Amino acid sequence: MTGLIGFAAIAQSVGSAYKNSFSLKGTQSFEALALLQRAAPRAAGDVEQVVFSVAHGAITDPAARTRVQALLARIGALPEVSSVASPFAAGNAAQISSSGRIGFANVILDKQGITFTVSQAKRFVAAVRAGAGGGLSVAVEGQVAEQTVTNNVSRAGFGAIAALIVLFLVFGSLLAAVLPLITAGFALGVGTAVVGLLSHLLDMASFSSELALLIGLGVGVDYALFIVTRHRQGLQQGKSVEASIVEALDTSGRAVMFAGITVCIALLGMFALGVSFLYGVAVAAAVVVAFTVFSALTLLPALLGFFGPRILSRRARRALAAQPTSSGTPSGPWVRWTGVLQARPALIAATGVLVMALIAVPFFSMRLGSSDAGSDPAGSTTRQAYDLLARGFGPGYNGPLQLVAQASGSAQQAAFSRVLTAVAHTPGVVRVTPPHLLPGAGGAPAVISADAYPVGSPQAASTGALLSTLRDTVVPRASARSGLHVLIGGQTAIFADFASVLSAKLPLFIGVVVLLSFLLLTAVFRSLVIPATAAVMNMLSAGAAFGVVTAVFQWGWLSSVFGISTGPIEAFIPVMMFAILFGLSMDYEVFLLARIYEEWHRTRDNRLAVTRGLAATGRTITAAAAIMILVFGSFIFGGQVTIEMFGLGLAAAVLLDALIVRSIIVPALMLVIGAANWALPRALERVLPRLNVEGAASTGLDGPAEPPASEPREVVGAGR
């Protein structure tokens, strides 16, 4: 409590400094930006588009024109503004729509928009929009304005309420249901405050806190659930409160720590990609996950000790008083399901794999990119500006391509004009602006630039194809033998290059994560077959989750239900999702296989071990999955497309992983494979480290002794 209050107070007083910052060295867009910054730093900043409209008459009417000119004068006086290209200036008549009701002004800032903090962006947008009124509407679009579009994090409250309902149904006790939410809430409070403070030291994207909240709420409740479940089992078996808490921490607590560390490692593994934009996001999510683990291992045991036997429902306490010990033998629908699996394991496993493969089919048509302002919430200033520009000029005016070159002398300037002529005659280009000459600094050659407006919106597939055509064919052909090196940059090109870079690095990242999971599971379960199966299943789960995201956000399936706009998949979504899914799937893998592993050493009967392990853990795993699904699903309607993609993708992944992979495919395959599941070469056995995630309950598992059948031992995450 003290930590929460302290960190919250410090964070409130200091504030946060989130900003979207990344660089893509070696790409045309980065080189174009660097060239502009060297030639004219104040003219190489971000370009914000201030869009204004009138409901009646025209922008050029005297009254409207006076208001617009006064607005642009105030904008030009802002300290961060380098210049304002007014539609009323000579040569800028094309910035007024054919109807005369919509116009825009390009506002060039003195630095890149990604260097603005959220608070600075809000002040800039507020200063611009203050000019609205008297029949004049004003909206802003650009990287600075985009930072003011926030996600509706209040949706997390719906997820928490849904999780509370699930916990109550599982435990039958309101107190037991509330404790996981309390511990997760404290962890999230401290974690998000620390993340806000870290944003002053690291560049963190504006959505970092929302994403960290989404992940932390899901795993935090689940981690507490596993510990509370184990503690309740100990009480029902007649153990004292203290002994039960100690055993819960020694078993489920170990697994929680292992799972949390795994998630953090997977998240921080994104540093290996070399894309700075992901560093702050990864750190934010890892910090919150670490605090959920710390809270589950410290605050939760203290609360369990304080409330004592009241963690059980009244019915359970009465039953315990009548019969002081309980065997804990699994019963119910999960026992019946294990019977079904034993009857036709090969058929069931094949059916499960086929279903997952079909769900993953859309993934193979996934198009990475960046959503534009057309996907922002309807009431946001960026969405209003986007709609006005699209209506007045065409969607391509929301993301021009910027052509930049260093021109030595009039001959190369003439060559640049020929390039612009070729670009203007390229199908898919609406308009090309006249060239703008920037004198080189310190006697360096001048830098010349111009904008090309495409037909399609920034996120349209046609715009990406046009960019490739211009870079690969049109521009090189038009500038041949002139010595002129023309670069194509701008925000649209930057995001296209970002998607290209991540697409190239994604296979390596996935390979490293899968290899890590294989090595960890090999060390834990002393097997080669089980880790190999888990690696394939992780890939299958990720593919199916990506398939769902692609079908909804790119193909438009159920888009009207979720209230979203279709477009490309955010380039960093697959990387982030795979890292998170790796950690979450490892949670369920460990909780399921730990029980099967113990039963195998107890009975040396693979079929019996698999069926007993699934029957004992099935209820707890599905309850944990239901909580995560509800928490993640509550973010689907948050209003910000990035968070919506994460919410849907993670909810679908957990649903498919828990319902099909861990409850159907994995146990069915283990039944088909038989005792070969546990084969491990002796040479590898000697060199592998031993990672004990089961605690004292696993002591002596490798020995021949078997415990009495009447005293089955529970393991990590065991359910009843």
Image (cartoon, rainbow, N blue to C red):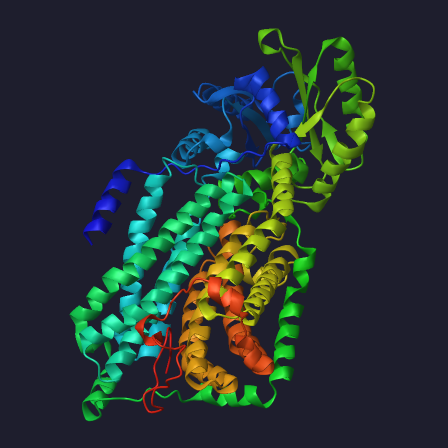
> Which residue does the image show at 32% across and 88% down from the upper left?
711
The residue nearer to you, when weighing 207 against 701, is 701
Q: Among all residues in the image, which is located at the extreme top?
A: 443
Query: Farthest residue in the left direction?
Result: 306
Looking at the picture, does residue 6 appear above or below residue 127? Answer: below
Quadrant where the N terminus sits is bottom left
Image position, residue 282 (x, y; %): 45, 47
- Please say if 487 is above or below 366: above
Q: Is residue 295 above or below residue 600?
A: above
Could you say where residue 397 lies in the image, as x and y percent from the top left?
65, 34
Query: Percent position (x, y) of residue 460?
Result: 68, 45
Res. 390 in view: yes
Task: Looking at the picture, tell me which residue is in the foreground, 41 or 148.
Answer: 41
Q: Quadrant of residue 89?
A: top right
Between 69 and 402, the one nearer to me in the picture: 402
Q: Is residue 369 at least partly visible in the picture?
A: no
Which quadrant does the C terminus fall into?
Answer: bottom left
Q: Residue at x 60, y 84 (%)?
A: 345
**For residue 502, above or below residue 300:** above
Residue 216, image x and y in percent? 38, 57
Q: How many marks?
A: 0
Q: As drawn, is 81 to the left or to the right of 553?
A: left
Question: Which residue is more in the foreground, 397 or 392?
Answer: 397
